[in-house]
Amino acid sequence: MNHKMIEIFEDCPVIAAVKDEEGMEKCLESEIPVVFVLYGDICNIGEIVGRLKKAGKVVIIHLDLITGLSSKEVAVDFLKQVTHADGIISTKPAIIRKAREEEMFAIMRFFVIDSIAFESIEKQTENVRPDMIEVLPGVMPKIIKKICRQSRVPVIAGGLIADKEDIMGALGAGAISISTTNQKVWFM
């Protein structure tokens, strides 16, 4: 499954990150095949995933942002069994490990805010072994290039991507894809 999913990401330079119902409607109008779900709650996440799957989208849920789900491993079981999502995103190592155990695609998100955060990426990636990592903010080509060189897993650049120049900078630095909530970028 992981190789197939990585191939899907390689063919999808722009990932739609959906943060609300308005974004959901726009995403459903787009041809973007991969969607990161950044909103919802325990009561409606199944419906959100169902709508996206019905439209033929690959759905990755940012578990940390779903209201009512805890940061416990059982939340991964819930998302797999109830929503049938394709994968999860999380900043929490235990969640990523559990997703891997459950054979869900696992993306570990890192916020690169200083040199300590930057240095921890390699260590965390080695220990947790996610399928991919997402680096925020995604508008730092020099940093993304360094991360791509040191990482053994593919990198997604996310956050603050606003235009074609940002996309080209991240992809040129070695990111496999970019993720953005900016709907204008989805239709470029």
Image (cartoon, helix red, strand yellow):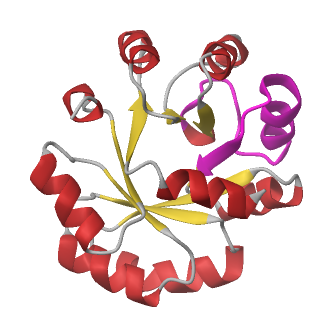
- Give the x, y percent position of residue 10: 49, 58
Tell me how many marks there are.
0
Query: Within the magenta stretch, is there residue 55?
Result: no
The residue at the far bottom in this view is 150
| Residue at image point 66% right, 67% down | 130
| Residue at image point 56% right, 83% down | 152
Front one among 175 and 129: 175
Give the vertical position of 69 relative to 152 (above or below). Answer: above
Give the vertical position of 64 relative to 1 (above or below). Answer: above
- Give the x, y percent position of residue 28: 46, 16
Give the vertical position of 144 relative to 105 (above or below). Answer: below
Q: Quadrant of residue 75?
A: top right
- Give the x, y percent position of residue 45: 66, 19
First to last magenta residue range: 65-89
Which quadrant holds the C terminus? top left
Q: Left or right of 168: which side holds 145?
A: right
| Residue at image point 19% right, 28% down | 184
- Give the x, y percent position of residue 64: 58, 41
Q: Left or right of 56: which side holds 105?
A: right
Query: Within the magenta stretch, is there residue 83?
Result: yes
Q: Quadrant of residue 74?
A: top right
Front one among 76 and 116: 76
| Residue at image point 27% right, 58% down | 138
Q: Quadrant of residue 147?
A: bottom left
Which quadrant holds the N terminus? bottom right
Q: Left or right of 164: which side holds 94?
A: right
